[in-house]
């Protein structure tokens, strides 16, 4: 109770009926004004009292969180978290309120009824009155648009690399076009010569030989164009807050039979950290599959099916980053290859497109992460992926 309220309470017996009526009218007006301000806030606001009972929730909080029931039940026996449609958010709210955790903040993602993904940040602070803990204040922020802007910015930055990619494509197209031009000129000369002499067309094998070359080069051009479209297509990531370790273990188990059939051992060593990262499960699988297949090819190239090949997959959290290490003891790479490993169209494989690691790089960047590679010829290679860990249990300003 404020000093003003205490003062009024002490003098209440001395006030006339008209003065009391005026006082309550003034208090009611102030209360309505305060309620309007709270409902007009763009931030979601939820307040629980010291007995873990819901004291207040504004419209912004109701809109931001995935409640399974609307309107929300407001009776004393109902617990707010029982009506939250996302299990992780519900568990977080319940844990913070019942265990009186405060000064923490965490981000969550959930799927709406329409299929889109939304992101919210939930911060918990203590509610202090008369220097005593009287409950908790929960602030809910819808950060979906901010996440979308971050994704858009990364995609715009990736467009800068299209200049180099276009130059590479122009170089790739130049050779098939030159071959097509030469062979068509040879055909034209042969036909012209035939018409000027006996009027008979050249021998059928002669024609087919050059036409087959032209068709082969056209197929090559078509493949270059399709690969180019594949390389420049946007990475349509459906980012969600997911735990990476279970996904990595699942992928490793999926690859294991193929590696085992070629006498290659997969070793996994995953940390106990349960951090949730902004990931797309399908795209993470694409990254892991590409790196695993490259590692398998390098190991087979060195051991030729004999025992001794090993692929190590590890995870760790270091300096606020989630680190994934994919290391093999295969043939390794030369310094020249190492310097160009993520460049489009650069490959050392006879049947490779040179776009696999380019896509890996693009996907990791879409996750706001980074990827580095270390390799030594004859000893193996290691790809190190670092991904940002969204701030959890962030220390806020302590209540005084």
Image: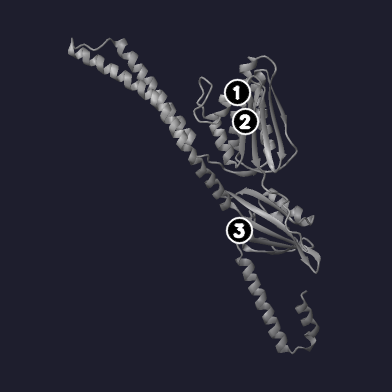
Callout 3: SS: helix
Residue at mark 1: 333
Q: Residues within 10 Å of mark 1 (few under 14, many from 20)?
A: many
Residue 231's place in the image compared with 145, above or below, is: above
Check the image and tell me how it is coloured. Answer: one colour
Residue at mark 3: 63
Where is residue 315 drawn, in percent x and y? Answer: 70, 35
Where is residue 294 drawn, in percent x and y? Answer: 59, 25
Can residue 347 be seen?
yes
Question: Residue at 74% of width from left, 40% of height from top?
Answer: 273
Residue 293's place in the image compared with 243, above or below, is: above
Q: Earlier in the sequence, mark 2 or mark 3?
A: 3
Q: Is residue 154 left or right of residue 79?
A: left
Q: Residues within 10 Å of mark 3 (few under 14, many from 20)?
A: few
Residue 30's place in the image compared with 223, above or below, is: below
The Cα–Cα distance between marks 3 and 1, rounded to whole angstroms, is: 53 Å
């Amino acid at each position: 109770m404020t000093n003003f309220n205490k003062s009024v309470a002490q003098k209440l017996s001395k006030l006339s009926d008209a003065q009391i009526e005026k006082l309550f009218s003034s208090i009611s007006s102030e209360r309505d004004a305060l309620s309007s301000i709270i409902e007009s806030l763009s931030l979601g606001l939820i307040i629980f009292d010291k007995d873990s009972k819901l004291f207040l929730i504004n419209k912004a909080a109701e809109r931001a969180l995935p409640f399974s029931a609307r309107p929300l039940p407001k009776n004393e026996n109902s617990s707010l978290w029982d009506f939250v449609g996302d299990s992780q958010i519900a568990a977080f709210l319940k844990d913070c309120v019942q265990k009186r955790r405060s000064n923490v903040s965490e981000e969550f993602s959930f799927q709406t009824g329409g299929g889109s993904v939304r992101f919210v940040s939930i911060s918990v602070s203590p509610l202090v009155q008369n220097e005593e803990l009287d409950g908790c204040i929960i602030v809910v922020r819808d950060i979906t648009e901010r996440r979308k802007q971050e994704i858009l910015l990364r995609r715009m930055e990736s467009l800068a690399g299209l200049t180099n990619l276009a130059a590479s494509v122009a170089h790739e197209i130049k050779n098939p076009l030159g071959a097509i031009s030469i062979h068509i000129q040879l055909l034209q000369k042969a036909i012209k010569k035939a018409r000027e002499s006996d009027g008979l067309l050249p021998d059928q094998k002669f024609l087919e030989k050059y036409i087959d070359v032209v068709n082969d080069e056209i197929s090559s051009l078509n493949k270059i164009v399709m690969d180019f479209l594949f390389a420049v297509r946007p990475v349509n990531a459906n980012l969600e807050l997911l735990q990476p370790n279970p996904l990595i273990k699942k992928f490793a188990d999926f690859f294991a039979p193929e590696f085992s059939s070629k006498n290659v051992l997969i070793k996994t060593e995953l940390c106990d950290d349960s951090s949730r990262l902004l990931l797309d499960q399908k795209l993470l699988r694409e990254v892991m599959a590409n790196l695993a297949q490259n590692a398998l090819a390098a190991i087979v190239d060195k051991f030729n099916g004999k025992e001794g090949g090993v692929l190590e997959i590890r995870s760790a959290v270091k300096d606020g980053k989630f680190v994934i290490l994919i290391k093999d003891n295969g043939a390794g790479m030369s310094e020249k290859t190492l310097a160009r490993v993520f460049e489009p169209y650069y490959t050392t494989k006879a049947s490779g497109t040179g776009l696999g690691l380019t896509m890996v790089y693009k996907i990791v960047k879409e996750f706001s992460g980074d990827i580095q590679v270390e390799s030594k010829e004859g000893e193996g290679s290691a790809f190190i992926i670092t991904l940002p860990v969204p701030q959890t249990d962030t220390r806020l300003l302590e209540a005084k």
